[in-house]
């Protein structure tokens, strides 16, 4: 198949491209490299089945050129502001990078009659709930601009599907970790401990706990759902049936760095920042019943991600 991957040089997008190329697909990758890195896709550059364009998908003239020169069977849309905390400082970044990028791609798909759309959504759409998060839970009131922009994107995807027959797959990600990440709790802890191996500042009370999904498991889940679920509008939670606390992550980072007697200093409160959801519990029965389950536990994913980041830093 001829596939467009937006945000393809990013953390998740580049792992997705690796798998799609392994499966024999022809890939066009778009990325403005604001978060993505050319190094993430450098091993595909000489592959005749791969083409990379450095561009902002909001630049419609450039984007239209790509759609004119390629006939796409499906678009995997990975572009977003993935730094949720940054969205509370820059109030336009999620409007532009998370929502308007989605709307612009959908417009182009309508114009050029591309009939399949796979979307990277998020647990952030749910907001805060004490119950288990099922796909049909509502009402939904996100507490971050990122979550609000992802929820608005889902609504527009549903409308485009109904009006123009674009078959769609929406995958709601948990915290995704692994090789090539650019930010997040593991990244921050390693950076802090590299600068000061005696003391580690931990945002909140350290009791925040969430499911952490290894990026390769995530990609498996996306492709499995895309291949196996054939509704006109498909939507799934993707995750792992275990959780890891922030303090546990700190302990694992200290262990993997070979440090001793590190003092943990908590900033206090039940969350790391405004807009952070300190706890959520995914119901994964829908994707499990389809036949997919993550191979690695949350703790295993955290340890793998720590090792990957430390290995990367050795080669800087």
Image (cartoon, rainbow, N blue to C red):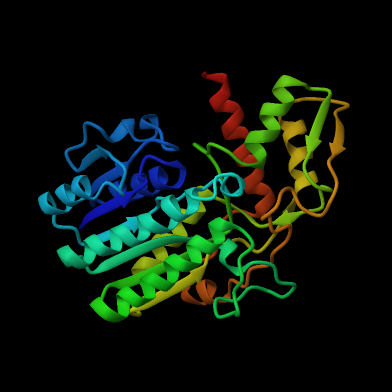
Is 296 located above or below residue 134 in the figure? above
Is 94 located above or below residue 118 in the figure? above
Name the residue rendered at 61%, 49% in the picture: 88
Name the residue rendered at 35%, 77% in the picture: 159
Observer-nearest of 270 and 74: 270
Is 146 located above or below residue 199 in the figure? below
Q: How many marks?
A: 0
Q: Tell me: 170 left or right of 60.
A: right
| Res. 53 visible in picture | yes
Q: Tell me: 8 left or right of 198.
A: left
Quadrant position of residue 42: top left
Q: Residue furthest front?
A: 91
Q: Quadrant of the N terminus?
A: bottom left
Image coords of residue 109 (percent x, y): 23, 63
Quadrant position of residue 110: bottom left
Image coords of residue 182 (percent x, y): 53, 36
Q: Tell me: 148 left or right of 6.
A: right
Image coords of residue 102 (percent x, y): 36, 59
Observer-nearest of 143 and 18: 143
Quadrant position of residue 275: bottom right
| Res. 257 visible in picture | no
Observer-nearest of 312 and 143: 143
Name the residue rendered at 60%, 69% in the picture: 126
Image coords of residue 206 (percent x, y): 81, 47
Q: Tell me: 201 left or right of 121.
A: right
Q: Residue furthest left?
A: 69
């Amino acid at each position: 198949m001829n596939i467009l991957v937006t945000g393809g040089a990013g953390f998740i997008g580049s792992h997705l491209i690796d798998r799609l190329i392994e499966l024999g697909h022809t890939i066009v990758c778009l990325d403005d490299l604001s978060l993505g890195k050319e190094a993430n896709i450098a091993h595909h550059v000489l592959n005749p089945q791969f083409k990379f364009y450095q561009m902002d998908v909001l630049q419609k003239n450039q984007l239209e050129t790509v759609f004119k020169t390629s006939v796409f069977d499906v678009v995997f849309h990975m572009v977003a502001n993935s730094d949720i905390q940054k969205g509370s400082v820059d109030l336009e970044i999620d409007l532009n990078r998370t929502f308007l990028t989605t709307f612009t791609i959908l417009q182009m798909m309508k114009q050029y009659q591309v009939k399949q759309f796979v979307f990277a959504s998020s647990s952030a759409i749910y907001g805060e709930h004490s119950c288990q998060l099922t796909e049909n839970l509502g009402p939904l009131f996100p507490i971050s601009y990122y979550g609000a922009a992802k929820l608005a994107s889902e609504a527009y995807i549903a409308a485009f599907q109904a009006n123009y027959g674009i078959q769609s797959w929406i995958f709601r990600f948990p915290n995704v970790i692994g090789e090539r990440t650019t930010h997040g709790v593991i990244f921050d802890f390693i950076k802090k401990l590299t600068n000061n191996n005696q003391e580690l500042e931990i945002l909140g009370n350290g009791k925040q706990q969430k499911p952490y999904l290894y990026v390769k498991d995530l990609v498996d889940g996306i492709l499995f759902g895309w291949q196996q679920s054939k509704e006109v509008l498909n939507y799934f939670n993707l995750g792992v049936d275990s959780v890891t606390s922030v303090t546990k992550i700190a302990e694992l980072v200290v262990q993997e760095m070979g440090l001793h007697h590190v003092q943990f200093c908590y900033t206090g409160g039940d969350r790391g920042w405004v807009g952070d959801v300190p706890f959520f519990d995914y119901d994964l029965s829908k994707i499990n019943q389809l036949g997919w389950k993550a191979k690695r536990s949350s703790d295993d994913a955290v340890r793998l991600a720590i090792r990957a980041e430390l290995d990367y830093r050795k080669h800087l």
